[in-house]
Image (cartoon, rainbow, N blue to C red):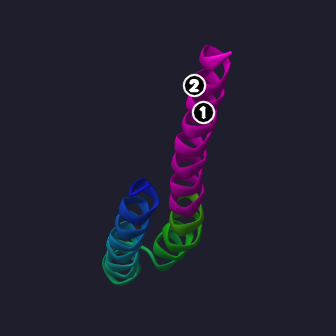
Amino acid sequence: MITPIIIQILFWLGLVVIVIGSVASMFSYSFWAGLGSLVFGSIGWRVWCELVIIFFGMHQSLSDIRANTMKA
C-alpha cells in the first residue's frame, strides 16, 4: 500500500504548516493562543492522520474478507 507513505508526507507537511502558523501567531497575535494551537493542532493533526491510516487498513481488511468469502 502506498497510502501510508502519502499520509506520512502529508503529516510532516501539515506539521510544518502548523508550527509556522503557531509561531507566527505567538509573535503577532497572542503567545498563549499560538502555544495552544501548536500543542492541540499538532495532536489533532496526528490523530487525524492516524485515523485515515486506520480507515484505509479497515478497507483493505474488509476487501480481503470479501474476496475470501466470494471464493467459497
The image shows residue 22 at horizontal and vertical percentages of: 40, 74
Residue nearer the viewer, 46 or 31: 46
- Which element carries disc 2, helix, strand or loop? helix
Q: Is residue 61 above or below residue 13?
A: above
Dots 1 and 2: beta carbons under 8 Å?
A: yes
- Residue at 60% of width from left, 56% of height from top? 47
| Tag shown at residue 39 | none
The main secondary structure of the magenta stretch is helix
Residue, disc 2? 67
> What amino acid does circle 1 point to?
Asp
The image shows residue 3 at horizontal and vertical percentages of: 41, 54
Residue 19 figure quarter = bottom left
- Residue at 43% of width from left, 67% of height from top? 8
The C terminus: image quadrant: top right
Q: Which residues are magenta?
A: 45-72
Q: CA distance from mark 1 to mark 2?
A: 5 Å
Residue, disc 1? 64
Mark 1 neighbour class, 10 Å CA radius: few under 14, some 14 to 19, many 20 or more: few
